[in-house]
């Protein structure tokens, strides 16, 4: 549950997604994630403390543990793509159901 809590925080998964390739500077990551500096700093601090992200030469990057998490999430990505293809308006429909 701790991992799901961490990954469920706003922009956490987006940060990991953006770091799947080459290291990124703070500014580049901020632009890619379309977020403010304060939130990005908070999430990076949490992700670094969890051992998923590190700051090294060239900027921020995923650690080996972060890369293992990325591999573990691949089946979810595959499922999400299939779900989106079957339910192109699924997210909107879910939001409308909540609002009644």
Image (cartoon, grey):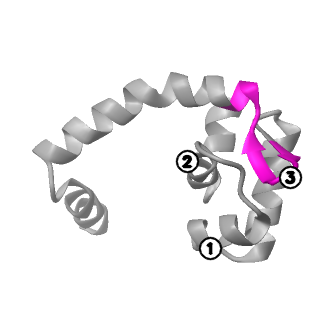
- What kind of element bears circle 3? helix
Instruction: Pick the residue in front: 96 or 18.
Output: 18
The numbered mark at residue 17 is 2
Whether the residues at callouts 1 and 2 have beta carbons within 8 Å, the answer is no
Image quadrant where one finds the N terminus: top right
* Circle 3 Cα neighbour tier, 10 Å, few/some/many (<14 / 14–19 / ≥20): some
| Nearest to viewer (mark 1 / mark 3) | 1
- In three-dimensional space, the C-alpha distance between marks 1 and 3, rounded to whole angstroms, equals 18 Å
Q: Which residues are magenta?
A: 54-66
Which of the two marks, 2 or 3, is nearer to us in this view?
A: 2
The local crowd at label 2, few if under 14, some if 14 to 19, many if 20 or more residues have their Cα within 10 Å, is some
Tag of residue 45: 3
Residue 34 in the image: above or below residue 21:
below
**Residue in the foreground of this view, choosing between 48 and 92:** 48
Q: Quadrant of residue 31?
A: bottom right
| Residue that sits furthest to the left in the current view | 86
How many numbered discs, if any? 3
Residue at image mark 1: 31
List the single residue furthest toward the bottom.
Answer: 36
Residue found at x 15% / y 45% = 85
Q: Is residue 19 magenta?
A: no
Q: Earlier in the sequence, mark 1 or mark 2?
A: 2
| Residue 20 horizontal/vertical position (percent) | 59, 42
Q: What x and y, as percent, mark residue 8? A: 59, 47
Q: Residue at the location (39% across, 24% down)?
A: 75
Decide if residue 42 is on the left or right side of residue 74.
Answer: right
Kindly report the distance in space between the C-alpha atoms of the residues bearing marks 2 and 3: 16 Å
Mark 2 or mark 3: which comes first in sequence? 2
Residue 1 falls left or right of residue 17: right
């Amino acid at each position: 549950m701790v991992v799901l809590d961490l990954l469920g925080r706003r922009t956490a998964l987006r940060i990991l997604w953006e770091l799947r390739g080459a290291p990124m500077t703070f500014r580049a990551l901020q632009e890619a994630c379309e977020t403010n500096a304060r939130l990005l700093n908070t999430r990076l601090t949490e992700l670094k403390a969890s051992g998923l992200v590190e700051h090294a030469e060239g900027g921020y990057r995923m650690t080996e543990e972060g890369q293992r998490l990325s591999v573990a999430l691949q089946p979810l990505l595959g499922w999400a793509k299939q779900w989106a293809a079957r339910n192109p308006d699924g997210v909107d429909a879910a939001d409308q159901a909540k609002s009644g």
